[in-house]
Structures are given as structure tokens and as C-alpha cells.
Image (cartoon, coloured by chain):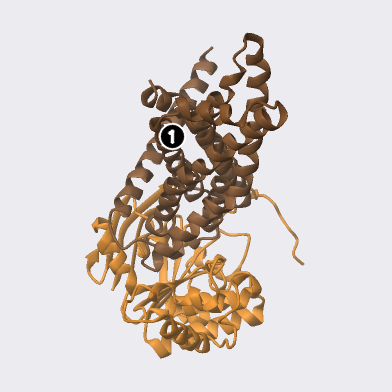
Chain colours: A orange, B brown
Amino acid sequence: MIKLEGLFKSFGKGGVLKGLDLEVEKGESRVIIGGSGSGKSVILKHIIGIMKPDKGHVFIDGVDITVMKESSLYETRKKFGMLFQMAALFDSMNVWENIGFGLRRRRDLRPADIKEIAVDKLKMVGLVDVENLMPSELSGGMKKRVGLARAIAYEPEILLYDEPTTGLDPITADAINDLIVEMREKLRVTSVAITHDMSSAYKIAGRISMLYDGKIIGTGTPEEIRGTDNPYIRQFITGSATGPIKIEGVSDDRNIDRN
Amino acid sequence: MIKLIETLGRTLIGFSGELGRIVLLLLATVRQALMPPLELRNTFYQMLEIGVRSLPVVVVTAIFTGMVFALQTYTGFKRFGAESVVGTVVALSMTRELGPVLTGLIVAGRAGAAMAAELGTMRVTEQIDALETLATNPVRYLIVPRFFAGMIMLPAVTIVADIIGIIGGYIVTVGLFKTSSVVYWKRTWDFLVASDIYNGLIKACFFGASIAIISCYKGFYTSGGAEGVGKATTGAVVLSSMTILISDYFLSNWLFR
């Protein structure tokens, strides 16, 4: 369903993706974990075709979107819904106009129908009576929910989540996790989420892949990942500053007595 | 010395790169503009923003420019007894030069800055990416309406500036210096030909398109958060104003010679 093959991408001098391969099957819920700035968002933007790779291919349902004409690419994007890290709601529109944005080109729908669909989607994400508010009047958690409602409005086959819980308090974050699981069960969509929040990853993932140094270095179910002996993945999931993954600007010989 | 050449070279490469990207964005905009249906609601909103909302500042600028122009010309021309042609000088300067250029500079400062800031904020908050994920071409949705609005509204506002400027000249020449009102209007109409007006409006149309495409370009390719938006906004106003002033010479040379 989604297949990334030998993907290379660099910005300026530094390579972000260095021959990345990834395959996500239909109906699967995949979570990609990795450090900040490791290129996780870049992967999502390649899947939906907002970014073009320097080298490599992206197949969606067997069709290579990297060589597609622009008009077909926009058609293919209708299969997708994406939730952005900061929700990326259009701040010149109110909540229901945001949710209905992707629907407004459908000529068979009147504004009243679109609003009805929007209210319906809002209910699905647990929000009522907010359809006429402006994005600036919403809290962070509400924005994410509205962002999710917008992503599912077009009834996509594939949902992409860019750090769905980042910037939220633990309780709101868990509510968003529940919502993602619920979406998967209700809508039977394929989903790819990127996160560095391990509790979120364990909860929403069917399988987890870890991105390190521009490549996927391991994939497994949450249980397999928990029990992995790969030192890189171990360091990441236990959240340790010492190990094979080096943090820029922190010297190796720094010893901290943690006791 | 080598450092100097290096800096010069780097500036030149940077400039050519930027010019190339602006031209590419212009081509993409024109291509999208030729494919119906257009975003009419957005276009009307932008026309309101660029045209109608710029009117108060343009009116104040035009009336005082016309007034000071008449004041200076009258007192200067009096030295060689040519004060009767003040009407002609004001009318020709306003329609051919000051109307389009001043309007262009005001719109660049007002609407150009707003375009760059809005698109820049949309870029850094991923709203432009969100448009793409919702199968909407951002050039078509955001830039085409602003491009059309700039091209249509700048000439429209320029006409107002031309008229108000000439009225400003009248107020000073007739009201302050007690010249005959008939002479002012006669001198205005005697030497003003239609091409003065429409060539001025062609310039305005070009300025409107330039402001829109440059400001949208600066906003569309913003990076680096709030600081980036600030830089894009300043850059849009500076580059639009420079483009207006420099292209004005070449356009005038082509249209009025």
C-alpha cells in the first residue's frame, strides 16, 4: 500500500534520509520513532508528495508518485488525511469551514451539507458546539481534535499523524491516543504516525519502526520493540542520554552521577 | 580583494537565484490563472484588501502631493512668468508619474507587507502544507487571487489618486494663489491627452502585478519561524519598492517617449 524505496533527501549539506526503505501494509497502524530532527516529518511529507526525494521512489497503491504529473498527484492526495504537529488549522476560517475545506470542491454539497458533515466529524473526535469558533479560541488539545476532524472529513484511506501528542499534557495526550486507536477501529484506515513519545507509540502502533541516521534500523510489534537487544533502539525507548546514539553538543566523556 | 570578489559573486548568485525563483512562481501563477474555475471569493476579498482599504492613505497622499506640487511649481514658475501652466504640470505629473508610483509604493507598504506576513505565517505554521494535503494547489488558492487583485486594483486606485492630486493642485492654485479657476481647468485639459492617462494605468497594472508576485514569493518561501516572517515582510516591501522605482524608469522610457 505504502512503499518507500531507497529514499535520499538532503537539505543544504546534511543528508536527512540516506537510502530509507519502508513498507506499510493496508490497514496497518505503523509508528515511526526517532530523535528530534532525525527526519521523521520528512518521511511523512514524502509519503503525501509535498516533498520530492533527491533519489528513490514512493509507491502509493503500487503507483510511483515521485514521477507523477501535478494534477494526478493532487488526485492521489485525496486518499490521504494528515494531522499536523501544531494542527495547522487555517486561522482565517472558523472550525467548520476548516473541517469542510476539502469538501468544498464537491459540487453536489451545499454549504449547509458541509457544515452538517463537519459537525458530525466533530462529534467523532469528541467535540460539540465548537463549529462556529475561530481556531484562536481553541486550546491546544481542541486544535488537534479539530485537525483530526479535518483529516478524516474526506474519508481518507490513509491517515498520517505528525507528532500527534507533542505539546499536550499527559492526560490530553492519552485522550488523543485513544482517539487515534478509535479512528483505526471505526474507519479501518491505514495509518502512519511519527512520534518520539514512547507511551503514545506503544498505545497506537501495530508495528513500530525506528529511524536513525537516515534509515530504518528496526521494525517490530510494541512487544518486540520493548524486548529488543538493538542498542540504538534500547537507548531510545529507555530514554537514556548515554549509549551509541550521540547527542550533538554533548561530549562523550561527560559523566553524571545519577544516584 | 579576493574577499570582495567573493562577496560580489555571492550576491550576484543570490540575486540571480531569487530572480529565477520569482519568474518560476510567476509562470506557475499564470498557468494556474488560465485554468478555470477561479477562486472568486478570495479574489474579491483581496481586491477589497488591496484596493478599497488602501484608499484612505492614497487619498491623503495624493491630495497633499497635488497641493505641494502646485505650491512649488507656482512659486518656481512665477520667476519666469509661467505660473499659468501649473494646471498642466500637475495633471501631467500626476497621471504619468506620481499617481502610479505613489500608489504603488503605498500599496507595497500596506498590502505587500500584509501578503508576505500572511503567507509567511501560513508557511511556518504548516498551513500551506495543509492546503496541499487537502488536494488544493496553494499557488492557485493563495497567489492567483492576489495577483489578479493587484493587477486590477492598482490601476483603479491610481485613477482616484490622479483625480485627487489634480484637485489638490486646484485647491492651492485657485484657493491660495487666487488664480482663475477657468485657467486652471483649461490648462489641465489643453495638454492632457488620453495616452497620458492610460499609459500611467499600464504602469500601475505592472506595479500591481509586481507587488503581488514579489510579496507572495517572499511569504511563500519563508523559513525560520517568527524571525523568518519578519524578514519576509521587510524583504517584500523593500524589493517591491525597488522594483517599482527601477521599472518605472524603463516603463516610462518605453511608454512615453
Name the residue: 42% across, 25% down. B252
Residue A158 percent location from the top left of the image: 36, 76
Name the residue: 41% across, 40% down. B22
Give the total number of marks visible in the rendering: 1
Give the quadrant of the N terminus of chain A: bottom left
**Front-lying residue, B202 or A161:** B202
Residue A42 percent location from the top left of the image: 44, 58
Any part of residue A3 in sight: no
- Compared across the picture, whether A27 is left or right of A95 comes to left
Residue B23 percent location from the top left of the image: 37, 39
- Compared across the picture, whether A19 is left or right of B184 comes to left
Q: Give the image quarter of residue A126.
A: bottom right
Residue B176 percent location from the top left of the image: 72, 29
Q: Give the image quarter of residue B107.
A: top right
**Hey, what amino acid is under mark 1?**
Ile
**Front-lying residue, B154 or A190:** B154
In the displayed orientation, state which residue is furthest to the top.
B80
**Front-lying residue, B254 or B165:** B165
Query: Mark 1, chain letter?
Result: B
SS type, badge 1: helix
> Where is B165 relative to A33, above or below?
above
What residue is shown with label 1? B197
Any part of residue A111 in sight: yes
For label 1, the crowd category at 10 Å Cα-Cα, with few meaning under 14, some 14 to 19 and many 20 or more, is many
- Compared across the picture, whether A257 is left or right of A28 comes to right
Name the residue: 54% across, 48% down. B116
- Compared across the picture, whether B80 is left or right of B36 comes to right
**Front-lying residue, B102 or B81:** B81
Give the quadrant of the C terminus of chain A: bottom right
